[in-house]
Image (tube, rainbow, N blue to C red):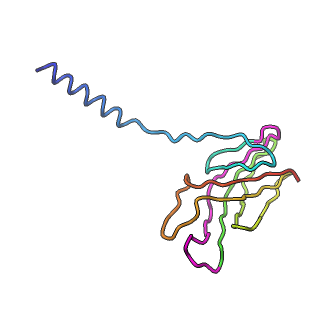
Amino acid sequence: MKNLKILIVLLASIISIGSCSKEEDFTQDLDAKLEEAFDLKVDVEATIPERSLTVKVIDVLEDSRCPELAFCTWAGQLKLEIEITDNQVTSTKEIIFQEGKELPFEFGDYIFSITQATPDTQIDEVIELNDYTFTFFIEKK
């Protein structure tokens, strides 16, 4: 009987320790290439190794895109805060995406564009930061 109580306490301890472990959200940085589209999520850094160039989405500052199935007078836009490092010089910039409209922005010797953003907005739904994916395209001037 005493051994059974010890076994129950031991099992309960193991279960409680296992349930307390924190699940980490590991994000992996990625390698990208100039003049090839690549997908990027918030807080993930893309590096173009041959150019010593990195880009990282820091935050979604605005998402005023028209929700699916809604009637809007304006398509809206998505405004991102991005961090760019070029030859060890880091700058924070804003970049805008509007569906069907190319809005490139120049930085140093490069032109940055967002060609797609997912998911689409829905009526009465909030998109969490980690659910966004942005398709970037970077080219040399």
Give the residue at x 65% y 59%.
117
User: Horizontal placement of 101 versus 13: left or right?
Assistant: right
Specify the farthest residue to the right.
141
Above or below for 8 versus 118? above
Q: Does residue 49 show up magenta in the picture?
A: yes
When asked about the image quadrant of residue 63, the answer is: bottom right
Q: Where is residue 91 in the image (x, y as percent from the top left)?
A: 75, 51
Nearest the viewer among 30 and 68 is: 68
User: Horizontal placement of 83 versus 15: left or right?
Assistant: right
Nearest the viewer among 140 and 55 is: 140
Q: Does residue 111 show up magenta in the picture?
A: no
Nearest the viewer among 2 and 37 is: 37
Specify the farthest residue to the front.
69
Q: Position of residue 17 (x, y in %)?
A: 34, 32
Specify the farthest residue to the top.
3
Q: Quadrant of the N terminus?
A: top left
Give the residue at x 62% y 56%.
59
Residue range corresponding to the magenta coloring: 48-73
Above or below for 128 versus 19? below
When asked about the image quadrant of residue 81, the answer is: bottom right
Q: Position of residue 137 (x, y in %)?
A: 76, 53
The mark total stands at 0
Specify the farthest residue to the left.
1
User: Horizontal placement of 95 versus 19: left or right?
Assistant: right
Q: Where is residue 25 in the image (x, y as percent from the top left)?
A: 51, 42
Give the residue at x 56% y 66%.
121
